[in-house]
Image (spheres, helix red, strand yellow):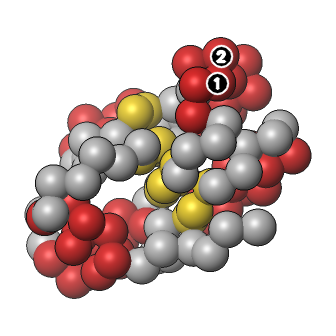
Amino acid sequence: MSTDISVIELKKRLDNQESLNILDVREQYEFDEFNLNGTLIPLGELPGRLDEIEHLKDEEIIVHCRSGARSNTAKMFLSTQGYSNVRNLIGGVMDWKSQFGD
């Protein structure tokens, strides 16, 4: 099981312009309000849309939501589907906004 990631670590990596696989499991309206330029696949749609991220099975995927709860569920689900390096963004967008604003 992969270690989760803090918003501070993620921001450093984004600031360094690393190429990251970020999966946003919130709903469309939440994504429209604020996003981290990840791929949007709402949690409820994830089981039916795995083919869209199949190529990432062995790569690091950083999954996030509003607070970290839905993304943790997504992390557990992806792990059962053979994704080997899924990391949950601790505190989600709420923590990101409290640390860095939007």
Amino acid bearing label 2: Asp
Q: For this rendering, which residue is in front, 60 or 32?
A: 60
Residue 90's x, y, as percent? 50, 75
Q: CA distance from mark 2 to mark 1?
A: 5 Å
Q: Is residue 36 left or right of residue 93?
A: left
Q: For this rendering, which residue is in front, 88 or 35?
A: 88
Q: Quadrant of residue 8?
A: bottom left
Residue at screen point 57% across, 73% down: 4
Q: For this rendering, which residue is in front, 90 or 43?
A: 90
Residue at screen point 64% across, 55% down: 85
Q: Is residue 22 left or right of residue 102?
A: right
Amino acid bearing label 1: Glu
Q: Secondary structure at mark 2?
A: helix
Q: Secondary structure at mark 1?
A: helix
85 to 4, vertically: above or below? above
Q: Which residue is mark 1?
A: 54
Residue 101's x, y, as percent? 13, 73
Quadrant into which the C terminus falls = bottom left
Residue 42's x, y, as percent? 55, 34
Number of numbered discs visible in the structure rendering: 2
Q: Quadrant of residue 92?
A: bottom left
Mark 2 neighbour class, 10 Å CA radius: few under 14, some 14 to 19, many 20 or more: few
Q: Which residue is mark 2?
A: 51
Q: Quadrant of residue 29?
A: top left
Which labelled disc corresponds to residue 94? none
